[in-house]
Image (cartoon, rainbow, N blue to C red):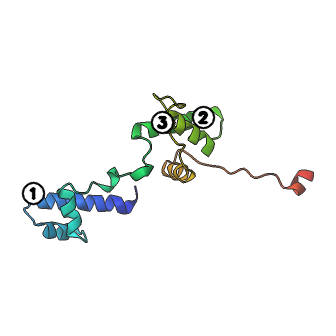
Amino acid sequence: MSNATKEFERRMAEAIDYYYNHDYSYSEAARAAGLKNHQTLSNRIQGKRESVTKLGGHNRILTPAQEEVIRAYGRSQAYAGWPCDRQLVAAAVQHVRNQGRDPELDPLPAPSKTWLKNFMRAHCDFHIIKWKPLNKKRRAA
């Protein structure tokens, strides 16, 4: 979660506190907490909109517990000497997602390259090293 999102959620919680505990109107509470739009506060209080941190859209393919399992698997593979690359993470994600179901009868699609890139960027446990072939001149020397 970005710092801007954390700051927004902090201000939103503060505005909700002003609304409930200090008998402010939506616009007064939003202004006191530094929110730009009182309608956002109104929608949050009325339950029309959830916290941004709870949203995941269609790319939310793992639960937090499953994410922790993937991270632990990546660490164990790294300690064993196997490089943690995108193929390893994709295979682990596919395996975890298909637990308890028959992959032949009800297969889940593999995670996209973009999802993998964002997942690995969001979790600092994974660090990709791109191997480059040795230069011909250096090899010949």
Q: Is the residue under label 1 in contact with that under label 3 (CB below 8 Å)?
A: no
Q: Which residue is mark 2?
A: 77
**In the figure, is residue 104 to the left or right of 31?**
right
- Whole-angstrom CA distance, mark 2 to mark 1, is 51 Å
Q: Which residue is mark 1?
A: 21
| Foreground of the two, 27 or 107 | 107
Q: Residue at x 55, y 49 (%)?
A: 112
**In the figure, is residue 42 to the left or right of 120?**
left
Q: Position of residue 126 (x, y in %)?
A: 56, 45
Q: Which residue is mark 3?
A: 97
Residue 80 occupies quadrant: top right
| Image height of 33 relative to 122, above or below | below
Q: Is the residue under label 2 in contact with that under label 3 (CB below 8 Å)?
A: no
How many C-alpha atoms fall within 10 Å of the one at disc 3: few (<14), some, or many (≥20)? some
Amino acid identity at mark 1: Asn
Q: Residue at x 89, y 57 (%)?
A: 137
Q: Position of residue 130 (x, y in %)?
A: 68, 51
User: Of the residues under marks 2 and 1, which one precedes in the sequence?
Assistant: 1
How many C-alpha atoms fall within 10 Å of the one at disc 1: few (<14), some, or many (≥20)? few
How many C-alpha atoms fall within 10 Å of the one at disc 2: few (<14), some, or many (≥20)? some
Q: Position of residue 15 (x, y in %)?
A: 19, 62
**In the figure, is residue 141 to the left or right of 111?**
right
**Element at label 2:** helix
